[in-house]
Image (tube, grey):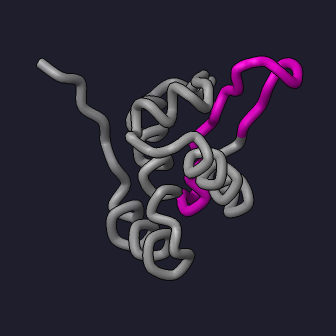
Amino acid sequence: MPASFKLDAYVADVLLRDLVSHDRSPAAFLVYFFLAARAGKARGGVTMSLAELADRTGLSKRAVQLALSHLRRRHLIRSAQAHRTAVPTHAVLRPWRVR
């Protein structure tokens, strides 16, 4: 049986329209959705190269690169690398949640 994950209603009700229509970046929504699904309950984030993200989402590497940049600018993900050539770890942020 495939694993499942819980999707906040905000992602479908607000974020989808905001990223796709307003920001004109459907790739950013697709990358966010993919990373959120992979992150699940993991607190550490998703460690994945640009090429692997491109392969898994069906997007070009450049489209993924632009999407990641857009998501970081919108504070929807945080990416970190141990050094310049290391594979980055992407943490999915949910700023709409009240702690």
Name the quarter where the N terminus is drawn.
Answer: top left
**Residue located at (51% from left, 74% from top):** 24
Q: Residue 45's spot in the image, x, y percent? A: 59, 28
The residue sitting at the bottom extreme is 22
Q: Position of residue 21 (x, y in %)?
A: 44, 79
Q: Residue furthest right?
A: 83
Q: Is residue 95 above or below residue 47?
A: below
Identify which residue is drawn at 24% across, 31% down. Answer: 4
Residue 60: image location, x then y, percent: 51, 44
- Depth check: give the residue in front, 47 or 56: 56
Q: Is residue 95 above or below residue 6?
A: below
Q: Say whether residue 17 is left or right of residue 79.
A: left
Q: Residue at x 52, y 57 (%)?
A: 28
Q: Residue furthest left?
A: 1
Above or below: residue 40 compared with residue 26 = above
Q: Is residue 81 magenta?
A: yes
Magenta range is 79-99
Q: Is 35 part of what is drawn in magenta? A: no
Q: Nearer the viewer, residue 88 or 93?
A: 88
Taking the spot 70% from the left edge, 53% from the top edge, the residue there is: 69
Residue 75: quadrant of the picture: bottom right
The answer to whether residue 7 is left or right of residue 38 is left
List x then y, in percent, for residue 95: 61, 58
What main secondary structure does the magenta stretch of the protein show? loop
Q: Is residue 9 left or right of residue 21?
A: left
